[in-house]
Image: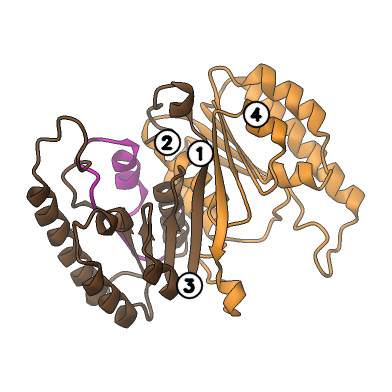
Chain colours: A brown, B orange
Amino acid sequence: MIIVFTGNGKGKTTAALGTALRSIGNGKKVKMIQFIKGPFKSGEDSSWQKLSSNFELIKGGIGFVGILNDPHSFSDHKKAADNTWELCKKTIKSRKYNLVIMDEINAAMDLKLIDDQEIKEFLQQSSENIDIICTGRNAPKWLIDIADLVTEMKDVKHPFNAGKQAKRGIEF
Amino acid sequence: MIIVFTGNGKGKTTAALGTALRSIGNGKKVKMIQFIKGPFKSGEDSSWQKLSSNFELIKGGIGFVGILNDPHSFSDHKKAADNTWELCKKTIKSRKYNLVIMDEINAAMDLKLIDDQEIKEFLQQSSENIDIICTGRNAPKWLIDIADLVTEMKDVKHPFNAGKQAKRGIEF
């Protein structure tokens, strides 16, 4: 089954984490591979390590793309995304996991960091007997077409709008 | 901070679970109180027990309201929802938790199981120094007005549409 969490609102990666938790609770093996988001520390790490040996988290990205003071070139980001995608393929093909989360892969495709034609062909052939979650805004139309479940997280109201700061443990 | 996950799509409770996980990872104490959803087993239970002593899950509801073969009367559901709301107030007032999740409280208000005027007054006075998540479809306008962060989970595509069955560990 292919599940897509897209849209401009909060809750996409968070819903993927919640789904992972439910799967682990049912004895499933889960691997989450993050595109784009960098190696900075967030609440996930410590909680996951405690959680279960059935969960693995890989951070493939080297930070947000094109933000102010981004120390990386576009081709650095592209290389990181390509390597991350290769890891996704290997992970899915290995048949060792019941659920594979490709976090921010939609954004990576939208930013042209990875070739979505190859991903399309791969996913069309590889979603039997495995659950795959693709998160990130601007999911391509072909992905929505082949997906089994798609939720759009729509930003109705956001603290940044009101000038508040992100809260550690809640907001990221 | 008041956070609302609403809309007709999948991912509302799941995003709340993911948020709980992140909070626990930051050493916070979390309590999730479920309205409406009944005591039937799901993937949450076993994974939560393993997760952390900083997480508590209370199932206040006695099943979905008004479904086929519902063995409970509306007043049974109302009584259960009233008791669940009393527990929420006690939990928030206790100041023992950094994050309190009121799961499906929006639906409980929408179904008139609980008096939303009282909830409005309580939340307006009680959201300092605590994070509160309200999930469920049809969040009332006043709640969106007082909330800090609101995401609408929109159903774009759902397996039930395509006649597929819910998958244990993914779909509920």
Q: Position of residue B23 (x, y in %)?
A: 43, 34
Q: Label 4 to label 1, Cα distance in Å?
A: 29 Å
Q: Are marks 4 and 1 in contact (CB under 8 Å)?
A: no
Q: The residue under label 4 is which amino acid type?
A: Asp
Q: Earlier in the sequence, mark 4 or mark 2?
A: 2
Q: Is residue A164 above or below residue B66?
A: above
Is residue A56 in view? no
**Residue A151 magenta-drawn?**
no
The range drawn in magenta is A28-55
For label 2, the SS is helix
The quadrant of the picture occupied by the C terminus of chain A is top left
Quick one: A115 or A149, which is closer to the camera? A115
Mark 2 sits on what residue?
B24
Q: Looking at numbered disc 3 in the image, what kind of residue is underneath it?
A: Asp
Residue occupied by mark 4: B145
Identity, as a three-letter code, of the amino acid under mark 1 = Phe
In this figure, which residue is indicated by the disc labeled 1? B55
Q: Is residue B101 above or below residue B37?
A: above
**Camera-side mark, 4 or 1:** 4
Query: Which label sits on residue A148?
Result: 3
Q: Is residue A110 left or right of residue A153?
A: left
Residue found at x 16% / y 44%: A62
Q: Find numbered disc 4 in the image and state the secondary structure of the residue it sits on.
A: helix
Q: Are marks 2 and 3 on the same chain?
A: no
Give left or right: position of A93 versus B51: left
Answer whether labels 2 and 1 touch (C-beta < 8 Å): yes
The answer to whether marks 4 and 2 mark residues whose Cβ atoms lie closer than 8 Å is: no
Helix, strand or loop status at disc 1: strand
User: What residue is rendered at 71% in x and 35% in y?
Assistant: B141
Residue shown at the point (56%, 68%) measured from the top left? B158
Label 3: which secondary element: loop
Question: Which of the two marks, 2 or 3, is nearer to us in this view?
Answer: 3
